[in-house]
């Protein structure tokens, strides 16, 4: 029987994810990862194989935790529609205002798209999966709104693309100035609410 590991893989992965989120892939060295995770070089290569493989695992961890949590309100409730989309952007705005120092780091996935997508096909696949996840989530919420008579069904596809692009842009704007990005989030939320179709007499 082999000796038990002296570390928890998930804890190491979260620490590495946050370091990559702060510094980006290229600026993060193996020595930086050793210091942040507490994992020595030998154990690091045994567990993850390479810095690139660790980075991909960190991206998946980010998608499974941070992105999934952000988009949860669009899929958890079968009635979630325009109000859920507006709530997502308002929630983002509140996050940006509450901790501007944290959110100047932006979004790990969007940062990675800017840094690495043109250089690496595997990273490009992660980027495409992120884009498609946004399109699917916004599209599902907009389709529910249309089914409920709250929104124009002919605009579901175009609006889902618009919202996906807006969210990616918001993350970039947060790196410049989270407070300004928060204001943009509020504007997007109001715009989404203006898509509601009002019945006769309203």
Image (cartoon, rainbow, N blue to C red):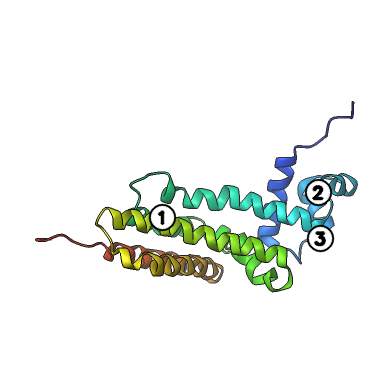
Q: CA distance from mark 3 to mark 2?
A: 15 Å
Q: CA distance from mark 2 to mark 1?
A: 36 Å
* Number of the front mark, 3 or 1: 1
Residue indicated by mark 3: 29
Identify which residue, 51 or 118, lies in the foreground: 118
Query: Image quadrant for the C terminus?
Result: bottom left
Residue indicated by mark 2: 48
Q: What residue lies at 64% left-to-right and 60% top-to-bottom?
A: 126
Residue 24 seen in render: no
Q: What residue lies at 80% left-to-right and 45% top-to-bottom?
A: 38
Q: Earlier in the sequence, mark 2 or mark 1?
A: 2
Q: Position of residue 82 (x, y in %)?
A: 33, 57
Left or right: where 121 falls relative to 66: right
Q: What residue lies at 83% left-to-right and 34% top-to-bottom?
A: 5
Callout 3 touching callout 2 (CB < 8 Å): no
Query: Image quadrant for the N terminus?
Result: top right
Local packing at callout 1 (Cα closer than 10 Å; few below 14, some 14-19, many 20+) is many
Q: Is residue 48 above or below residue 9?
A: below
Q: Position of residue 142 (x, y in %)?
A: 36, 58
Left or right: where 120 falls relative to 142: right
Q: Position of residue 169 (x, y in %)?
A: 50, 70
Q: Secondary structure at mark 3?
A: loop
Q: What residue lies at 77% left-to-right and 55% top-to-bottom?
A: 53
Residue 140 tag number: 1
Residue 67 seen in render: yes
* Number of the front mark, 3 or 2: 2
Residue furthest to the left? 201
Identify which residue, 82 or 66, lies in the foreground: 82
Task: Please identify the quarter of the rendering in which residue 83 is found.
Answer: bottom left
């Amino acid at each position: 029987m082999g000796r038990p590991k002296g570390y928890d893989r998930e804890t190491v992965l979260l620490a590495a994810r946050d370091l990559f989120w702060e510094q980006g892939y290229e600026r993060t060295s193996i020595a930086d990862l050793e210091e942040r995770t507490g994992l020595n070089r030998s154990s690091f290569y045994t567990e993850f194989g390479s810095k690139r493989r660790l980075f991909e695992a960190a991206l998946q961890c980010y998608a499974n935790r941070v992105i999934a949590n952000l988009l949860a309100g669009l899929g958890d409730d079968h009635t979630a529609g325009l109000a859920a989309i507006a709530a997502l952007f308002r929630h983002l705005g509140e996050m940006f205002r509450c901790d501007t120092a944290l959110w100047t780091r932006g979004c790990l996935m969007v940062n990675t798209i800017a840094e690495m997508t043109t250089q690496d096909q595997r990273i490009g696949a992660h980027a495409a999966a992120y884009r498609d996840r946004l399109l699917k989530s916004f599209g599902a919420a907009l389709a529910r709104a249309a089914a409920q008579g709250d929104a124009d069904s002919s605009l579901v596809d175009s609006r889902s693309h618009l919202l996906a692009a807006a969210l990616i842009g918001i993350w970039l704007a947060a790196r410049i100035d989270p407070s300004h990005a928060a204001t943009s989030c509020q504007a997007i939320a109001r715009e989404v609410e203006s898509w509601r179709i009002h019945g006769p007499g309203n």
